[in-house]
Image (cartoon, rainbow, N blue to C red):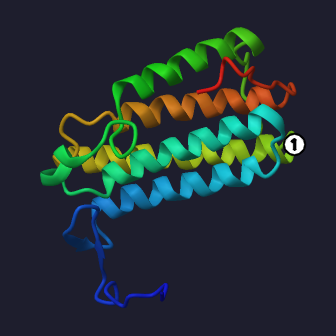
Amino acid sequence: MKVYTRTGDDGTTGLFYGGRVSKAGLGPEAYGTVDEAVSTLGLARAYAVGELNDEILSLQRQLFVVAAELATDPSNRHKLVPTVSLTTEQMILDLEAALDRLIADVGAPDGFMVPGESPLSAHLDLARAVIRRAERRCVAYADAGQLEGSFVVPFLNRLADYVFMLVRASETNWQPSKQEKL
């Protein structure tokens, strides 16, 4: 099997469940930025240990769900599977519950946090910033009418908040308990 197909040499990319669009389109820009967020979380995970490593991996896998939804033409959205290739409201509720527990454990910040306290927290903060950019790209895609009824934007909004708190938590050597994991 070859890694290259040459089908994208014309500047288009294939979509999940078929179809091709410009690589410069709003959809590829949105899911490409989500892919960057997955990679930046991977950088953070390389420094994380124990349950925090597992927690970050869970977040990366959830972003694969988001990317699958974004990489699907809206006419094929009905083919997506909740929590496998379709972002759900429950995913948001689970993030909110985890965020509430995290704030209860480590407290909300009382001022600005300057990135760079540790390699882990710096990489988490970079991931948070990329997630916010992904959110903006998804808002543009939604504004173009391509995410009708989708939970992608609120999920990314909550995820950025959660990763913001993971930055703070990582600076206190916090580790999620097995029952707290997403």
Q: Quadrant of residue 55?
A: top right
State the residue at coordinates (63%, 34%).
163
Instruction: Describe residue 16's horizontal placement relative to residue 131 as left or right.
Output: left
- With respect to residue 106, does 72 lie above or below? below
Residue extending farthest top: 104
Residue extending farthest front: 1
Q: Quadrant of residue 36?
A: bottom right
Instruction: Describe residue 171's horizontal placement relative to residue 87 as left or right.
Output: right
What's the residue type where badge 1 is placed? Ser
- With respect to residue 90, does 38 lie above or below? below
Instruction: Describe residue 50's horizontal placement relative to residue 108 as left or right.
Output: right
State the quadrant of the C terminus: top right
Measured as percent of width and height from the top left, residue 10 is found at 28, 88
State the residue at coordinates (64%, 25%).
181
Secondary structure of residue under mark 1: loop
Crowding near the residue tagged with mark 1, few <14, some 14–19, many ≥20 C-alpha atoms within 10 Å: few
Measured as percent of width and height from the top left, residue 141 is found at 27, 50
State the residue at coordinates (75%, 20%).
177
Tell me if residue 132 can be seen: no
Tell me if residue 74 can be seen: yes
Q: Quadrant of residue 17?
A: bottom left
Measured as percent of width and height from the top left, residue 179 is found at 67, 17
Residue for badge 1: 118
